[in-house]
Amino acid sequence: MKNSLDSLVKDAKVIAIVCNQWGDTGKGKFSEYFANNWADVVVSGTGGNNAGHTVKIEDQEFIFHLIPCGALNEKTANIIGNGTAVDPIVLMKEMDDLKKQGYSLNNIFISGDAHFITPLEIFFDIMEDKFSGIGTTCRGIGPSYAMKISRIGVRINDLFNEELFAEKLEKNLEKYLCIARNVYKLSDEQIADIFRHKNIGGDYLNGNKVDIKKIISVYQEAALKFKEKVTNTVYLINKMIYSGKNVLLEGAQGTLLSIEFGTYPYVTSSDCSITGLLQGCGINPSKLDLTFGIVKWPYMTRVGGGPFPTEISNESLDKGENKETEKRFKLDELLKAGDPVSLRRYLRIKGNESGATTGRPRRPGWIDLVALKWSLMQNGKDIIITKPDVCSELDEINMCFSYTYCGQDTYYDGQTFEKGKMVHQFPTSANILSHCRPNYITLKGWKQAISKIETYEDLPKEMRIALEKTELETVASIRMISVGPERRQTIVK
Ligand code: IMP
């Protein structure tokens, strides 16, 4: 396998892994795969603990939120880049958990310019999400980036300047409370209730009042624990590139959730395409040798709100469902029933589709080639296919190659969208996209277990036909195929 990986990456020195869909496609597995087989350093540059990468090695499962996946390899350096949003309490917990499992974490570096999440941003995220209905992870990501762009954010470096940190936090609290009281008309009790939300915990309250002094002291104390890991990561990464190290850039979320290229406003607040990742790591684009875009196939998922044209059945089914309640369903019965509701449940249970960060059920749907073509314009043509094994027992699979517009007449992107219009370009407007119905090509399923297959040629014929159709339709080149969650279940094409 090492030989085929060598021939795939050839002389590449900087490789990026991003997701071409709505996240949760298995980037973690491939970051870890490259970290273990190739990289000297793994860098993250976007998002924060809204992300969750799951890595499975033999019997052990690791879920990373902030620390790059290279942390499992003692020789690999791990850098949290300037474009990330860091919650220090989450970072400390993640570090402590890994240390308990025997990892030294000597090789972790954190950008002093990365922005910072405090309970104030989490509070604001929870409050705004109730009104926007975006379905964020409520981890404070959006407000932290909003403060950054408004030029009133708090950077990691600010943490070590006690006075400046306290001053910034006090101002931010004033602003957030003003909005809570005057825009959202919340009482002090309602505000306090939000501070009791599980993502914050009631610790920062004194009665119903927000105890800003406590926030300041807890966060400064946490910061002291990782003080020596803070550095100018842009210099660090660029020095590593110049000295010929193998550098892996680890994307977060997915391009369809990008603030620039995603289904606005149902997006996250950073640009999770390759462009945003490069910026968030501080790397000149000409230094990038290869980008692999991950594609969950032939089904895909989305978590949180927002349009999803190829969704199978609909979200209302998920209310009250979780890993526990799902246990009452039997996979073979769901498969036999074959209706969309059963198929939705089947894919979710078989694919273990619950958010790694929030545990929320993910919404499953068929592979959308219109959306994929859109993401490929940003991320390039080299793709990695993940989770086809989840669909190995299906009689047939669907791939969406265009949409039919079914909404009211609307002027959009310089043209009138009217009922019945065939749509071949991905509309990033959530409003337009929510009125797009998918047109499918239906192909025969392969009906054969694939988890132990080691070469492309040995994959079932029907599966290769569907993969080649995907390549032809999108002009993508499939470089690797994951046939199971484990590191070794990887085919290099
Ligand atoms: P936020 O990033 O918490 O602001 O959430 C904005 C949207 O992005 C919501 O729909 C989230 O469910 C989604 N989202 C954020 N992070 C992830 C991720 O790592 N995987 C999948 N969806 C995500």
Image (cartoon, rainbow, N blue to C red):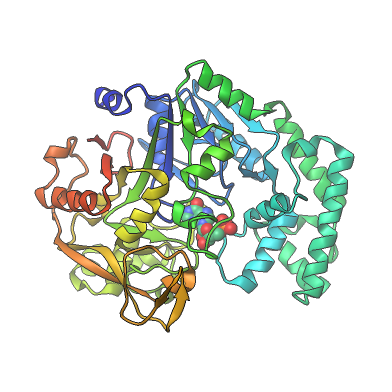
- Please tell me which residue is depicted at 68% across the width and 57% down the height of the picture: 143
The reply to whether residue 20 is visible in this rendering is no
* 12 horizontally vs 210: left or right: left
Question: Measured from the top left, where is residue 403 in percent x and y?
Answer: 31, 70
Q: Position of residue 356 (x, y in %)?
A: 48, 52
Image vertical order of residue 405 relative to residue 298, above or below: below
Image point 31% across, 80% down: which residue?
420
Image side of residue 243 versus residue 28, left or right:
right
Residue 309: image quadrant is bottom left
In the rendered image, the vertical position of residue 324 relative to residue 473, given as above or below: below
The image quadrant that residue 347 belongs to is bottom left
| Picture coordinates of residue 215, whole percent (x, y) | 80, 49
Tell which of 362 and 474 is nearer to you: 474
Task: Kindly indicate the quadrant of the structure image that contains residue 493.
Answer: top left
User: Outermost residue, left direction?
Assistant: 461
Side (left or right) of 330 relative to 91: left
Residue at the top extreme of this rendering: 243
Question: What is the number of callouts on the image?
Answer: 0
Quick check: can you spot residue 17? yes
Residue nearest the observer in this picture, 192 or 395:
395
Measured as percent of width and height from the top left, residue 282 is found at 59, 34
Q: Which part of the image, by quadrant, shows the N terminus?
A: top left
